């Protein structure tokens, strides 16, 4: 049985290489735009699953949108509209993300697919007809790169 013997120098080089690799991974992984993209994906998934408690956790307490909704009425309206789906898939590709300090924007054209009542079919048809992007405006709430909250949504083709 062979016993591996490392010199102090070889051990130091190996530890330094692992530390450098971890640092490079952390710098890449915790970029604000990457974290915002992940947060947005989790928000969309909560909507697909109609998990309104989780969806509400992504909205800032001062949330306001173009249609006069605040945090509570926004979730209630989404619950009412998307509650008519038996099955729902929301596609948001491509996604354009910009981050400037603690403010971030996600621009995308969400597409809905699924089955449900006649109201669900109307919502799906209307949403998929929209030509302009929706803009989701986010704010980073703390020093943590993943601590993003949705503060507003804009889509000029949807009237209030």
Image (spheres, rainbow, N blue to C red):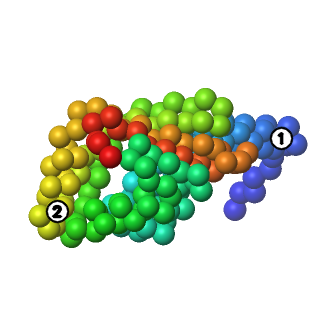
Of labels 1 and 2, earlier in sequence is 1
Question: Taking 40 as reference, is 30 left or right?
Answer: right
- Work out which residue is located at the far right of the displayed protein and give it: 8
Q: Residue at position x 17%, y 40% from top? A: 129
What percent of the width, then of the height, locates residue 1? Answer: 69, 62
Give the residue number, with chain letter if any, for mark 1.
Answer: 12
Question: Taking 19 as reference, is 92 left or right?
Answer: left
* Residue 144 visible somewhere in the drawing: yes
Q: Residue at position x 50%, y 40% from top? A: 137
Q: Residue at position x 59%, y 52% from top? A: 62
Above/below status of 81 relative to 144 = below
Give the residue number, with chain letter if any, for mark 2.
Answer: 119
What percent of the width, then of the height, locates residue 64? Answer: 50, 48
Q: Residue at position x 57%, y 32% from top? A: 99
Above/below status of 13 relative to 48 = above
* Residue closest to the eye, 75 or 24: 75
* Residue closest to the eye, 102 or 20: 102
* Residue 93 visible somewhere in the drawing: no
Of the residues tagged 1 and 2, which is closer to the observer? 2
Q: What whole-number distance in Å separates the C-alpha atoms at marks 1 and 2? A: 65 Å
């Amino acid at each position: 049985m062979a016993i591996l013997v490392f010199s102090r120098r070889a051990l130091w080089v190996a530890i330094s290489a692992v530390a450098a690799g971890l640092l490079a991974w952390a710098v890449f992984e915790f970029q604000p735009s990457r974290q915002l993209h992940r947060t947005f994906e989790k928000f969309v998934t909560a909507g697909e699953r109609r998990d309104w408690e989780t969806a509400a956790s992504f909205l800032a307490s001062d949330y306001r949108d173009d249609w006069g909704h605040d945090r509570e009425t926004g979730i209630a309206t989404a619950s009412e509209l998307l509650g008519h789906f038996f099955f729902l898939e929301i596609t948001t590709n491509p996604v354009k993300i910009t981050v400037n300090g603690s403010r971030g924007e996600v621009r995308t054209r969400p597409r809905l697919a699924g089955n449900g009542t006649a109201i669900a079919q109307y919502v799906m048809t209307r949403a998929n007809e929209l030509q302009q992007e929706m803009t989701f405006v986010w704010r980073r709430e703390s020093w943590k790169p993943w601590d993003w909250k949705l503060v507003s949504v804009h889509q000029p083709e949807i009237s209030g």
